[in-house]
Amino acid sequence: MVDHVAKENVNQVVDIGKAESGPEGGGRGYELPLLLFGGFRTLIDRLHARLATEGHPDLRPAHGFAMQAVGARGATASEIGRRLGVSKQAAGKTVDRLLALGYAERADDPADARRKLVHLTPRGYEALARSAAIFDELRAEWAATLGADRVRDLEAALRNVVPAETAFRLDATSWLGAP
Amino acid sequence: MVDHVAKENVNQVVDIGKAESGPEGGGRGYELPLLLFGGFRTLIDRLHARLATEGHPDLRPAHGFAMQAVGARGATASEIGRRLGVSKQAAGKTVDRLLALGYAERADDPADARRKLVHLTPRGYEALARSAAIFDELRAEWAATLGADRVRDLEAALRNVVPAETAFRLDATSWLGAP
DNA sequence: CCACATGGTCAACCATGTTGTCGATTCTAC
DNA sequence: GTAGAATCGACAACATGGTTGACCATGTGG
């Protein structure tokens, strides 16, 4: 079941281990990652809530990343693994998942008998297109709440502070629990 | 091995499925979640890089969330599960992990023979305190790069746009791959 | 032609989740 | 006071998604 997170003492977060308020932040540095993750989670949750009502109820965040890794021209499992930052075996399993859900297909590469080209199905393309459109709408909602310039500022600030190669890494799924 | 993510066509991200540039965002809404996650990931990666050099090389992001759920006064596995938004069984396994790593201990509750109180060890407290201090330092670095007010703005903007009960949920780990 | 690199798959394992069940204990309502 | 409900912790079975390691088939470059 795992209904919903208890609201109880959720605000105790980081109360323990609180740093002595330095001259800089006043010991509230721990909020920053939580807010960033909260923003990310809010967007992704709402994206998938929308997708679920539009014919893609089985699509998970991880699948979106995987489909991005497949790309428009298709890719082999090894390539996908490299793009996602996981082993080719793990990529293979993820591809199996996409196949089972009907978002991708596997075909022999006539030019190289070792390779098996994975490419998106029309349904896969459609899901990506919908996702992009929904992200645009969600951003517009933020702009309506915050003002367009504050959203632009927020993006600009983040671009300054997160390395470009980090921002567009696709290995979002694996990463949290990584050993 | 899974060395590092290939830099190759990482920038193709969301090139496919791109929405027609609307009046609002110009079809770049997909950047927002990536930047937010990139920021979060950057902070967490650097936190754990620091922690690793300070005697906590085995600590993973998930463990930090779990220790927060344990809290200063200890908690039972069921409580931890509720706070993390996972089943009590899953929470129990996570607690086992924390025990094995030496960050928590389990003891019978004298007042209730059913309960087993999980509480942090000194090492657990130390890790949380170090984490809080490092987060403060990282925030200060962002302030040095962006300016203190832009960081404050960023935080304020996010607070406006992410529901309070979302911002401080601890179930960060489970959530990405959730079924 | 042969050595080597590359691609896909199989197998074993680990970490984390999920259900479902169960015994033990506590709480509650009568 | 006691019967029934609720809660806690544990065990078992399973899914998912990672990891290695091994292996075979194929392509490539000396």
Image: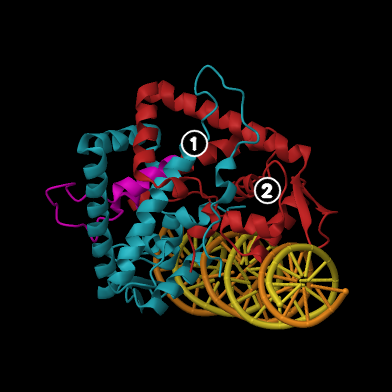
Chain colours: A cyan, B red, C yellow, D orange
Residue A120 falls in image quadrant: bottom left
Quarter of the image with the N terminus of chain B is bottom right
> Which three-letter amino acid code belongs to the residue tagged 2?
Val
Residue A31 has which mark?
1
Residue B53 in picture, x, y percent from top left: 66, 33
* Residue found at the far left of this picture: B23
Residue B6 in picture, x, y percent from top left: 42, 51
| Relative to B82, B102 lies left or right | right
* Dot 2: chain letter: B
> Is residue A135 visible to the viewer in this orientation of the structure?
yes
Task: Please name the residue shown 65% across and 33% down the image.
Answer: A17
Q: Is residue B145 above or below residue B33?
A: above
In the rendered structure, which segment of residues is drawn in magenta?
A: B10-39
Q: Is residue B148 above or below residue B36?
A: above
| Relative to C15, A92 lies left or right | left
* Residue found at the far top of this picture: A23
Pick the front one: B168 or D19: B168
Task: Please name the residue shown 39% across and 28% down the image.
Answer: B152
Residue A82 in picture, x, y percent from top left: 45, 57
| Relative to A138, C17 lies left or right | right
Query: Magenta segment: does it hold B33?
Result: yes
Residue A172 has which mark?
none
Query: Magenta segment: does it hold A106?
Result: no
* Dot 1: chain letter: A
> Which three-letter amino acid code belongs to the residue tagged 1?
Glu
| Relative to A154, A179 lies left or right | right
Q: Which residue is identified by label 2?
A: B70
Which element type, helix, strand or loop, lies under badge 2? helix
Real-space Cα distance between discs 1 and 2?
19 Å
